[in-house]
Image (cartoon, rainbow, N blue to C red):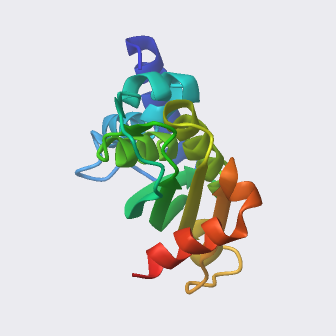
Amino acid sequence: METANRSKAEQAVRDLLSAFHIKEKPGMEETPQRVVKMLEEVWAGEQYTNEDLAKMYGKQFEADTHDLVVVKDIEAFSYCEHHLALIYDMKVSVGYLPDGKVIGLSKIPRIVDMCCKRLQLQERIGTDIADVLSRIVGPSVVVRIEARHSCLTARGIKKPSSKTVTLTKRGAFEVDDDLVRQFLYQLKE
């Protein structure tokens, strides 16, 4: 974030606290700077398109395999674009069918993290991850996300045990129910 934007953002934090009649207490002198620094970190993905992420993490390796690859239980969090509320206890599982090439396994959690570091909807997180991966490894990608949303668990209706589950399918996963079942079975092991 540029200096002018940082200054403007810090003032916005001060204005927000003031609007809620929250008076500065000892220890809060640097709160605006801390909040802006935190937001720069947790919203870092906002500056990248899915195409950018595919270029950043898209190093592929030739591989003579077409077997299902699954990376499961990737822990992540995001912020909902409707309330700026935390999406937490998120577990993301990704599967893909190599199309003559594979990606380094550590790149998959990096892609998940950057797609989550945006103001998001859970449904779009799955779509973004699938889009980035399909640009790298080919069209057949599946993404399952299970998460809690603080806009549902901590405010409003306040249902703390509720979870939201989404399944995003691309390529062969859209037409082959057995392949989807195989992916879901791998998540249970």
| Residue 163 to residue 61: above or below | below
Where residue 74 appears, as percent x and y from the top left, is 38, 60
Identify which residue, 107 or 75, lies in the foreground. 107
Q: Place residue 83 in its image quadrant.
A: bottom right
Furthest-right residue in this view: 175
Where residue 140 appears, as percent x and y from the top left, is 61, 47
Q: Place residue 10 in its image quadrant.
A: top left
Identify which residue, 106 or 171, lies in the foreground. 171
| Residue 11 to residue 21: above or below | above
User: Does 141 sit left or right of 52 as displayed?
Assistant: right
Residue depicted at x 36% and y 32%: 62
Residue depicted at x 47% and y 18%: 5
Identify the image quadrant of the C terminus.
bottom left
Q: Could you tell me if residue 102 is visible in this image?
A: yes
Furthest-left residue in this view: 27
User: Does 165 sit left or right of 2 as displayed?
Assistant: right
The number of callouts visible is 0
Where residue 160 appears, as percent x and y from the top left, is 56, 84
Where residue 37 appears, as percent x and y from the top left, is 33, 35
